[in-house]
Amino acid sequence: MVYDGILAAILIGFLRKGNFKGFSQLNIKFGWVFPVLLIVQWIIFLLQNKFELLGHISNHVFILIYVIGLALLWVNRHHGLGVWLILIGVFLNFIVMAANDGRMPVSLEAAQTLDPAYGEALQEGYYGKHTALTDGTHLGFLGDVIALPEFYPREQVISIGDIIMNIGIFLFLQMLMVKHRVDRKPSVVHSS
C-alpha cells in the first residue's frame, strides 16, 4: 500500500500544480539508508523460504530494520507533520511485530480476500515478515486486519499503522511538491 500512497500523492501533487523542485531541496539525514533497508527486506522476502537459516533469523532482521528506520525517522522529525505520522505508523507496526516474535500478524478472515495460497502459506509458517493471527497473538488489532474493499485495484490487507503511515507519506509529499512549486508572479513595472 505504501507504493500506492506514493503514486497517489505524486499525482495529486501534480493536479495541485506542484512539481519536484522540493525534492532537490530536501535534506534528509542519512537518507541513503532508507532504500538500503527496503532492499534488505526485499532480499529477505525472496530468499527466506529457500534458505532455512535466513528464515529462522529473518524475524530478528526485520526488527532491526524497524529499529533503524524508527531512529532515522526520529532524526528527521523536523520535516513536519507528515514525517511524524510516518513515524507513528511505523512505530505501531513495530510494536505489534516486536510483540509477536518479529512477524506482522495477518487476520486469516481478512486475508480471505487475497489469493488462497497466501492464507495457506501463513498457516504453514513464516511468509515474508507475516504470520497468521491466532488466539495467541499479542496486540492483534494492530496487525494486518483491514481488508481493502473490492473496488480497490489491488487486493491487500493492511494495518492501522499502514493507514497512518500512508497519510503521513501523502502529507509529506504534498508539502514537498506544492510548498516549493514555482508560482509565476506578474512582473512589476517601475515608472521613472
Image (cartoon, helix red, strand yellow):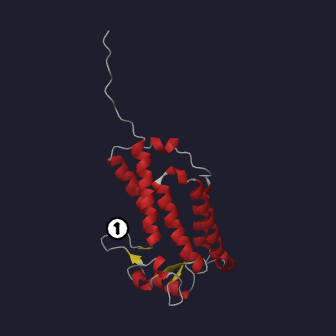
Residue at 64% over, 75% down: 58
Quarter assignment of residue 35: bottom right
Where is residue 74? Give x, y as percent.
58, 58
Q: From where the camera sits, is residue 143 visible?
A: no
In the image, residue 2 sits, relative to residue 187, either above or below, namely: below
Residue at 62% over, 76% down: 59
Instruction: Say what amino acid the circle numbered 1 marks.
Output: Pro
Residue designated by label 1: 153
The extreme top residue here reads 192
- Residue 77 vs residue 155, the one in the foreground: 77
Where is residue 170? Give x, y as percent.
41, 56
Mark 1 lies on a secondary structure that is: loop
Where is residue 95? Give x, y as percent.
56, 74
The image quadrant where one finds the C terminus is top left
The image quadrant where one finds the N terminus is bottom left
Count neighbours of disc 1 (C-alpha within 10 A) and say few if under 14, some if 14 to 19, many if 20 or more. few
The extreme bottom residue here reads 135
